[in-house]
Amino acid sequence: MSFRARLALVAAAAVALAIVAASFAVYFIVKDQLRAPIDDSLRHSAVDIQHTPPDDILRGLFHLTAQLGGAPGYPQVVKPNGQVIAIGSRTTPLPVDDRDIDVARGQSSTFLRDAHVSGIHVRMITFPVGGVAVQVVRPLNEVDHSLSRIETWLILIALAGIAIAAALGLLVARAALAPVRRLTATAETVTHTGDLSQRIDAGGHDELARLAASFNAMLEALEESTRAQRQLVADASHELRTPLTSLRTNIEVLASDRTLPPGERERLLNDVVEQLGEMTTLIAELIDLARGEQHVAEPEEVRLDLLAADAVERARRNQPKVTFITDLHESTVHGVPSTIERAVANLLDNAAKWSRPGENVEVGVDNGAVTVRDHGPGIDDEDLPYVFDRFYRARAARGLPGSGLGLAIVRQVARAHGGSVVAEHAEGGGTRVVLRLNGASNNS
Ligand code: ATP
Ligand code: MG
């Protein structure tokens, strides 16, 4: 059964239940209201008769006065031995049972009950008067007739109500589920066409509008990530083509011209080895980037100061021409050590690359942040906004080795750790880059 049908059914069932309950209540109230006057008039008759002298009663000499033109009722006297005395010329006997005889004997008090006399539904009162019991009945057929008409009407009204409730339930369900249908249609279109630019009209502030808005946001995120992936692949193939072309040229020269002077041959071979090395690095960086936010390892508590000390140690070995000065304070962050290490290494690599021989590079760690500052030429203002973009290299950098992926990786690591990275001019010249990793423990 569809959700819409279920919703309609539940709505209709709720309304139907209310209608049926109301109908029952109306029926019983009306029944009570119709029968109460009859019981009242019977009790009145009883009081009337109780004023008649007992001898007259025994001889059946009494008659009932009608109240306000109503029916006077039909009486009968019951002796304690069960014998009945008919009143006037009437001959239809009223039913007598043990309780009536108990009343005649004075063992029971006045009571009312329903009975059938010659097939007629009646209401009967039995009460004691001077050693006998008197029964008075009044027919209930008018009341029964009214009640049965009311019953028919109530059933018809209830049925109509239920039908209307079902129809309205369907309409309500259809209206309520229209946004869900639109959502489904869009999701299906996206599935079939792979077109992530689809959006749903998410007007309003209700739950479904919020669902539509989240769905749109999800599509947007997906679209953005697909776009980023395409961009990465496009950029990467473009970047790989340049070193591949020069590699190819070098190898072709080496292969075709066997008369190259040994010095030239040596230089070309060195070039080839260097270019291969660069390409290897580039490919490794690309793989890192492509892995993106998907965590390769489980995050853990990382001592940032110790990690930085290791990275500096390695940088010292690789870059003996610069002097690394450290100021490391104990600091713990929650993160993936290998990726943080990579980011710090990239920062140290840049600082060393842009320092002149003998210059200092200052590395600080404090409160979940790594600061690397060099005394090189600094980054031009026009380059500053772009240095974290993939493959971006300032004009001045074009002559130096590198692919422009280092800082992009740093930014990716920072984001994956809920942190940030900024590059700025350092006072007195040079560049300062601050990598801030969130999740720094408070006690650090
Ligand atoms: P890769 O790191 O991929 O080998 P790269 O160092 O050129 O190449 P990034 O580390 O992303 O690339 O840096 C991007 C650009 O930012 C650099 O090309 C350079 O122009 C500029 N840059 C980065 N760090 C510094 C620095 N410490 N001083 C001056 N310029 C810098
Ligand atoms: Mg770099």
Image (spheres, rainbow, N blue to C red):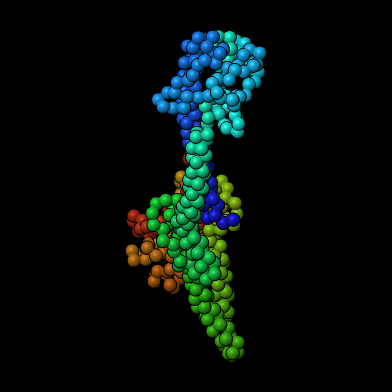
Residue at (48% x, 26% y) in the render? 38
> In the depicted view, which residue is nearer to us: 259 or 344?
344
Q: Relative to 64, say whether 355 is above or below.
A: below
Q: Is residue 378 left or right of residue 73?
A: left
Residue 350, can we see it? no
Give residue 434's position: percent from left, percent from top. 43, 53
Q: Is residue 435 left or right of residue 252?
A: left
| Viewer-side residue, 284 vs 320 | 284
Q: Is residue 74 visible to the viewer in this orientation of the structure?
A: yes
Q: Position of residue 156 (x, y in %)?
A: 50, 46
Front residue of this view, candidates 416 and 148 = 148
| Residue at x 49% of width, y 64% of height | 186
Question: Viewed as shown, does residue 98 lie left or right of 198?
Answer: right
Count of numbered labels shown in the rendering: 0
Residue 103 spot, x, y in % from top left:
60, 14
Quadrant showing the N terminus: bottom right
View extreme (front): residue: 89
Residue 21 picture location, percent across and down = 51, 38
Q: In the depicted view, which residue is nearer to us: 249 or 24?
A: 24
The residue that appears at 57% across and 50% down in the rendered structure is: 299
Q: Is residue 258 above or below residue 289?
A: below
Name the image quarter holding residue 202. Answer: bottom left
Please tell me which residue is depicted at 56% across the width and 24% down the height of the picture.
90
